[in-house]
Amino acid sequence: MKVSIKTPARLHLGLIDMNGDLGRMFGGLGVGIDHPNVILTAETASEFSVTGQEVELTRNLAERFFSKYQIQPKVHINVTHMIPSHVGLGSGTQLAMAVAFALTKIFKIKTSIPELALAMGRSKRTSVGTVIFQKGGFVVDGGKNLKTNAFPPLIYRHPFPKEWRFVITVPNQNKGLSNSEETNTFDKLTKMPSCDVAKICRLTMLKLLPALSEQDIQSFGEALTQIQILTGNHFAQAQGGTYCSPISSKCIDFMKEIGVYGVGQSSWGPALYAVVKQEQAKPTLKKIKKYLEKSVGGEAFIARANNNGAKVKVIED
């Protein structure tokens, strides 16, 4: 048997509740995008082997799966494409879920996506990346239950408008936090004031989500930018400002100046995004690339939403 998987990437657009006084914390907002991608194949073999990109990480993920499900590892995994790591585009979850899901097919293991994510050490705070792997689209999860540590439930999912685009900017600077660094940082954060949590909830429920349903890009962008500022101000105690660096702040200011509808930082960055209409995307990209060339350098590209999740192809022997 051979299994091929191509995942979306994800933009993490903010956290709803960093207070926790209701018994739940976090609650993520996010959207799947069509690239970059994790692309891999897994096929039955006489022994276990891994080739391609991120060999050590892929091997560790597979071995975690084998240990969890008590599998005799006879499979070859080849990772041909990888989402850049630690830039805020969700590479860790997409690789972990792609490896694990492929192996469930190879070894005919029946389990749910939430169970698989928890088994692979994902979705500890937010399930945005896992749901995007499974379904794509714009998603909101209900946060982590502080008593049970269960999989954060999916509260809302909606297809992202086909006519809207993201212009993604990754300035040349230090990569974002991940793994133990991220955990340590979350542990040290003070609680977000409940009044700020209330503002984020109100913006989400009464502006962001209705605007998405009505395809009102102006209101959607305004709400998203405001949510990002509130979230970023809370994380300033860890990252030094509303965004992850002065470089990012200047890039955000520039994107606002050139007339995009909404801006923000994905996860810990350094990936930044601007929300634009389809016809604005190429002119906006050109301006951002010119800005980067004259300042810090970096990469910029256009992405559209992924509304379907990972593509999976199974070829039976």
Image: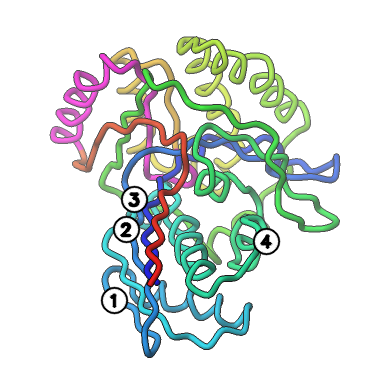
Residue designated by label 2: 82
Amino acid found under the numbered disc labelled 2 = Met
Q: Quadrant of residue 287?
A: top left
- Report the side of 118 relative to 61 (left or right): right
- 117 relative to 162, above or below: below
Can you give x and y, in whole percent of width and height, for residue 261 in the image?
A: 41, 15
| Residue 37 disc label | 3
Amino acid found under the numbered disc labelled 1 = Thr
Callout 2 touching callout 4 (CB < 8 Å): no
Alpha carbon distance from label 1 to label 2: 13 Å
Of the pair 219 and 250, the residue shown nearer to us: 219
Q: Quadrant of residue 139?
A: top right
Query: Start and end of the magenta stretch?
Result: 266-295
Residue designated by label 1: 51
Callout 4 touching callout 1 (CB < 8 Å): no
Pointer 2 or 4: first along the chain = 2
Near mark 2 (Cα within 10 A), the count class, few <14, some 14-19 or many ≥20, is many
Pointer 3 or 4: first along the chain = 3
Alpha carbon distance from label 3 to label 2: 6 Å
Residue designated by label 4: 115
Q: Is residue 186 magenta?
A: no
Pointer 3 or 2: first along the chain = 3
- Report the side of 66 relative to 269 (left or right): right
Of the pair 280 and 65, the residue shown nearer to us: 65
- The residue depicted at 51 percent of the width and 81 percent of the height is 63
**Viewer-side label of 1, 2:** 1
Amino acid found under the numbered disc labelled 3 = Asn
Can you give x and y, in whole percent of width and height, for residue 50 in the image?
A: 34, 78
